[in-house]
Image: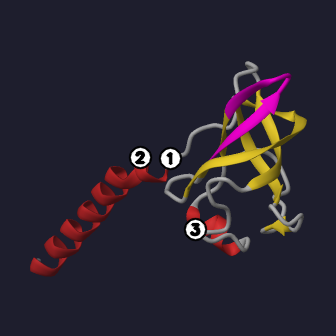
């Protein structure tokens, strides 16, 4: 009888653990990005944030005499690492060209697809498929 009771407690604890960690596995939608519209941004890196759950590039993009700061959302550190990125891949002041899916509402934000670095070489491997 003691063994059945112990097994039942383990099963209940396991179920409770799965329920408690479900929010950790949840992920936001990429619906704010227009997956049908690809754009190219050229500018200077203000900051490259190597962080989870997503890395970000803050890019200063000059257009018509005005510089606008774009927030470009990337994948996780693990995803970027597998694609050849490292925390020092781009640095503040680097001139880069980034291909993105832009925000549907026209605000200066985007989802990263690929990039070319300051020396004209591709950075990492290009991302394929839809926005997460």
> Which class describes the residues within 10 Å of circle 2: few (<14), some (14-19), or many (20+)?
few
Residue 65 shown in magenta: yes
Q: Measure the alpha-carbon separation of dots 3 and 1.
A: 25 Å
Residue 61 position (above or below residue 9): above
| Residue found at x 75% / y 48% | 112
> Which class describes the residues within 10 Å of circle 3: few (<14), some (14-19), or many (20+)?
some
Residue that label 3 marks? 87
Q: Secondary structure at mark 2?
A: helix
Instruction: Tell whether 49 sits left or right of 98.
Output: left
Instruction: Tell whether 58 sits left or right of 129.
Output: left
Q: Position of residue 113 (x, y in %)?
A: 80, 51
Q: Position of residue 28 (x, y in %)?
A: 57, 39
Q: Secondary structure at mark 3?
A: loop
Farthest residue in the bottom direction? 3
Residue that label 2 marks? 23
Farthest residue in the top direction? 105
Instruction: Please state, as top left, top right, bottom left or bottom right, where the N terminus lies in the image.
Output: bottom left
Kindly identify which numbered label has been placed on residue 26.
1
Viewer-nearest of discs 3 and 1 = 3
Q: Measure the alpha-carbon separation of dots 3 and 2.
A: 27 Å
The residue nearer to you, when weighing 4 against 19, is 19
In magenta, the rendered stretch is 57-69
Among the 4 quarters of the image, the one containing residue 115: bottom right
The residue nearer to you, when weighing 36 against 40, is 40
């Amino acid at each position: 009888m003691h063994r059945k009771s112990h097994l039942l407690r383990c099963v209940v604890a396991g179920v409770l653990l799965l329920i408690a960690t479900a929010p950790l596995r949840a992920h936001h939608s990429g619906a704010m990005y227009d997956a049908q519209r690809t754009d190219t941004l050229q500018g200077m890196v203000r900051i490259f944030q190597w962080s989870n759950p997503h890395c970000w590039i803050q890019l200063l993009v000059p257009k018509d005499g005005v510089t606008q700061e774009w927030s470009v959302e990337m994948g996780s550190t693990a995803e970027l690492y597998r694609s050849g990125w490292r925390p020092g891949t781009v640095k503040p002041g680097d001139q880069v060209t980034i291909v993105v899916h832009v925000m549907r509402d026209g605000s200066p934000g985007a989802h990263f697809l690929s990039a070319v670095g300051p020396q004209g070489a591709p950075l990492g491997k290009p991302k394929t498929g839809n926005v997460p």
